[in-house]
Every structure is written in C-alpha cells, then in structure tokens.
Image (cartoon, helix red, strand yellow):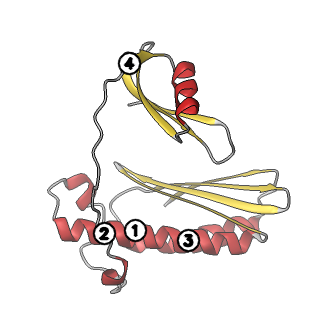
Amino acid sequence: MNFHIRGENIQVTAALRDYAEKKIGRLDRYFDQDHSLDVHVTMRVLRGDSTIEVSMTMGSVIVRAEETHEDMYAAIDLVTEKLERQMRKHKTKLGRKIRVEAGTKLAFRETSPVALFEEDEVDIEIVRTKRFDLKPMDSEEAVLQMDMLGHNFFVFHNSETDSVNVVYRRNDGKYGLIEPA
C-alpha cells in the first residue's frame, strides 16, 4: 500500500500516521499482493470535530469513506470499519454476478479472509428510470438549474468541453463538478 497522508488544521504526528497506516493497512488482505494500491488519507479538524477521509485507488476500483468523531483515533477506527464493509459488499457482488472484467475481478483475492459475506448482501433493485434531453450549457448554468430544481446533483451537456458532466452539492455546501477522464 502506498500511503499519502496529509492534515488540514492538524499536525499529523508520527504516532497518528503509524496508527492510520496500521489500521487501514489491514485492509490489504482483500486485495492481491501483485497490484499496487494507492491510499489517500486526509485528516482535518474543524470546530473540535476530527474528520478523516480515505480514498483507496487501484486501477478502476475506488473505495472511499469519510468519518467524523471527537477523537481522531476513534475516527480512524470508524472509517476502517466502513471501508471494510464496502469491500466485503463489493466482493460479494462480484462473486454473485461473476464478472468477466479482469481489472476489477482479479483485484480482489479469490479466498475471503472473512466468511460473513451473506450478512452484507444487498440486492440492488432499480425502481425507476428517467430519460431526458441534455441541454448544452456551462457549469454555472447547470448549478443554477440544480438549485432551482432543489436537487443534489444535475447531469448536463457541457458546452465548453462538449462532454456529459455532473454538478453536485458537497457536504460543505459548496459545489463539485464531475468530468469524464
């Protein structure tokens, strides 16, 4: 695992860094050893609350979790549990559907270190499908449209880049833009 740890409004001490690497490092048992795994950890303190955000990237597989707690060590424990649940869920889904996509399927080990997959199974059922025309507009107009509709995200055809983009409202109240790579 390649760790990239940074702090915002907090000095990341050696003890805090070691604890995060140790706890999150245990999750490597879900991945094959011959794949490189990038782990981006951001620790921040805001108004007395400690927040940790972890993104694990390996090829096309991205696992992300964020947790907030009064104590940074407790937040690290919580985010590790959340990441482990996500990985078990994803691996169970892959096993159930037996995907042919080698990049995703081969990223996970064939044998499970935890035999509790049935508890985490979630049946995904799409209950509604919407179709609509994508109007060409810039990202600012898309944000205005999203706010007028009262939605948390808005899909649009970006007239500046000539591609389909998504604007969304972040947890901090600001806006984000998703563009295809």
Q: Position of residue 41 (x, y in %)?
A: 61, 56
Q: Which mark is residue 135?
A: 4
Q: Residues within 10 Å of mark 3 (few under 14, many from 20)?
A: many
Q: Earlier in the sequence, mark 3 or mark 1?
A: 3
Where disc 2 sits, the SS reads: helix
Q: Position of residue 21 (x, y in %)?
A: 60, 67
| Residue bearing the label numbered 2 | 91
* Cβ atoms at labels 1 and 2 below 8 Å apart: yes
The residue lying toward the viewer, choosing from 152 and 76, is 152
Q: From the viewer's perspective, is 65 left or right of 166? A: right
| Cα gap from disc 1 to disc 2, whole angstroms | 6 Å
Look at discs 3 and 4 and give the one toward the viewer.
Answer: 4
| Cα gap from disc 2 to disc 3, whole angstroms | 16 Å
Tell me the residue at 50%/38% (across/down).
153
Q: Is residue 99 visible?
A: yes
Q: Which mark is residue 87?
A: 1
Q: Position of residue 51 (x, y in %)?
A: 71, 60
* Cβ atoms at labels 3 and 1 below 8 Å apart: no
Q: Residues within 10 Å of mark 1 (few under 14, many from 20)?
A: some
Look at discs 4 and 1 and give the one toward the viewer.
Answer: 4
| Residue bearing the label numbered 3 | 80
The residue lying toward the viewer, choosing from 69 and 38, is 69
Residue 63 falls in image quadrant: bottom left
**Identity of the amino acid at label 1?**
Met
Tell me the residue at 85%/56% (across/down).
47
Q: Residues within 10 Å of mark 2 (few under 14, many from 20)?
A: many
Q: Position of residue 119 (x, y in %)?
A: 36, 83
Look at discs 4 and 2 and give the one toward the viewer.
Answer: 4
Q: Earlier in the sequence, mark 4 or mark 1?
A: 1
Where disc 4 sits, the SS reads: loop
